[in-house]
Image (cartoon, coloured by chain):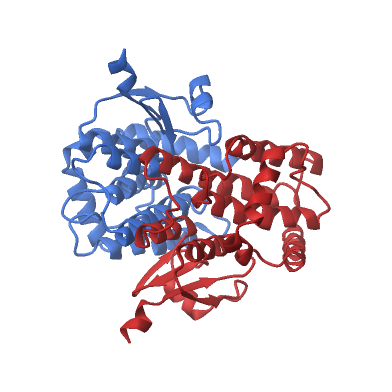
Chain colours: A blue, B red
Amino acid sequence: MAEKEERVKLLGFWASPFSRRVEMALKLKGVPYEYLEQDIMNKSPLLLELNPMFKKVPVLVHKGKVLPESHLILEYIDQTWKNNPILPQDPYEKAMAFLWAKFVDEQVAPTGFRSVVRAEKGIEVAIKEARELIMYLEKEVTGKDFFGGKKIGFLDMVVGSMIPFCLARGWEGMGIDMIPEEKFPELNRWIKKLNEVEIVRECIPNREKQIEHMKKAAERNKLA
Amino acid sequence: MAEKEERVKLLGFWASPFSRRVEMALKLKGVPYEYLEQDIMNKSPLLLELNPMFKKVPVLVHKGKVLPESHLILEYIDQTWKNNPILPQDPYEKAMAFLWAKFVDEQVAPTGFRSVVRAEKGIEVAIKEARELIMYLEKEVTGKDFFGGKKIGFLDMVVGSMIPFCLARGWEGMGIDMIPEEKFPELNRWIKKLNEVEIVRECIPNREKQIEHMKKAAERNKLA
């Protein structure tokens, strides 16, 4: 019984970058877990019970402790299983990793739908604005193997789950190559390197299925 | 010269709860700092240079390192100056403190203007919805001296700067007692205790001045 209670559970949604990054972290640490796929359009009583304040995936359950929010879950995983560290030790570097993660999730992510699908200012302006934000990431990864340094870390999981394997596929579904090689050579190099990491590949949603999913989400956003 | 570079600088705005909580943390730790008041309606070249990604106060500058975002700044302060700890040591408790902070800043804070001033559903519904969120905090502080336990900590600074000494004054300006004693006895008890802490008192904006400021902000929101 004790063994069962100690097993990690993850409530997630297959197309959610927030869920995918948590799986990356669990796999990197080699933590076995039970994955519970959620229907985010029709929230389960379990999800509402475990995360009443935010009502969102992912939610991690470990030894009876319940934790939502991907940045917090990644840090909890890093502090609970010490092998293969994912966050910097230095307080300032760690804060900067969280700052970049916040930038990606709060500033870059909304450009996926808000600025492009509903582009009141015209689609060209929306693309230009999204690229201005992405350019910060291009500069940040310049001269580095990964955002985290020589190996993948917290920020690679956050940016990786959100941009190349989620937003870019949404843009692709709209016929937009948002991160062209000639404008973003460093990001493209990093995406290729990321694709070579086995635990990342294991966590990436199927490309065609995700493009289809993002097209439908964009359609819903247009109508909303 | 070295001494000058090591001195902490804080870019803030007097009525911002995000700035006020950083001052509380610096005062609790006894860290001397230079405070640089910013005009948030007319952003200074210094602010835009130091925080180009978010363009917001507060920004902490320490030994040439530049750090925006209040939750990250509070953790950085806690890790850099070890006396009077403000965050729990336990990884799960720490994650929960950040979760509550996120709840306050992302879910409760918008009820100040969005739900009440622009209440499309009617002001009574907006008040009810805001109180439903605040009730989570009432339950969380029940039976505790402070959110952080026996002494003030991270969450007391986050909730304290945001709710009693900012949002409640905005509501007061609209003639609404959002947190009445009979509905929220524990929160009211906590607010009284918080008022007794000297470093908190030193960081609270002038009540009349803030009510006036919040009234003007509400007026701008109505017109926007």
Image height of A38 relative to B125, above or below: above
Nearest the eye: B42 or B84? B84
Please report the residue visible at 55 percent of the width from the left and 54 percent of the height from the top.
Answer: B157
Please report the residue visible at 49 percent of the width from the left and 59 percent of the height from the top.
Answer: B70
Place residue B3 in its image quadrant.
Answer: bottom left
Most extreme residue toward the top is: A1
Instruction: Note whether residue B179 is visible.
Output: yes
Please report the residue visible at 50 percent of the width from the left and 51 percent of the height from the top.
Answer: B153
Image height of A95 relative to A78, above or below: below
Q: Is residue A177 left or right of residue A129?
A: left
Q: Is residue B219 left or right of residue B107?
A: right
If the image is split into quadrants, where does the N terminus of chain B sit? bottom left
Nearest the eye: B8 or A177? B8
The number of numbered discs placed on residues in the rendered structure image is 0
Q: Is residue B62 left or right of residue B14?
A: left
Nearest the eye: B102 or A120? B102
Place residue B66 in its image quadrant.
Answer: bottom left
If the image is split into quadrants, where does the C terminus of chain B sit? bottom right
* Residue A55, horizontal then vertical, whole percent: 53, 32
Please report the residue visible at 53 percent of the width from the left and 79 percent of the height from the top.
Answer: B44
Most extreme residue toward the right is: B175
* Residue A8, horizontal then vertical, whole percent: 32, 26
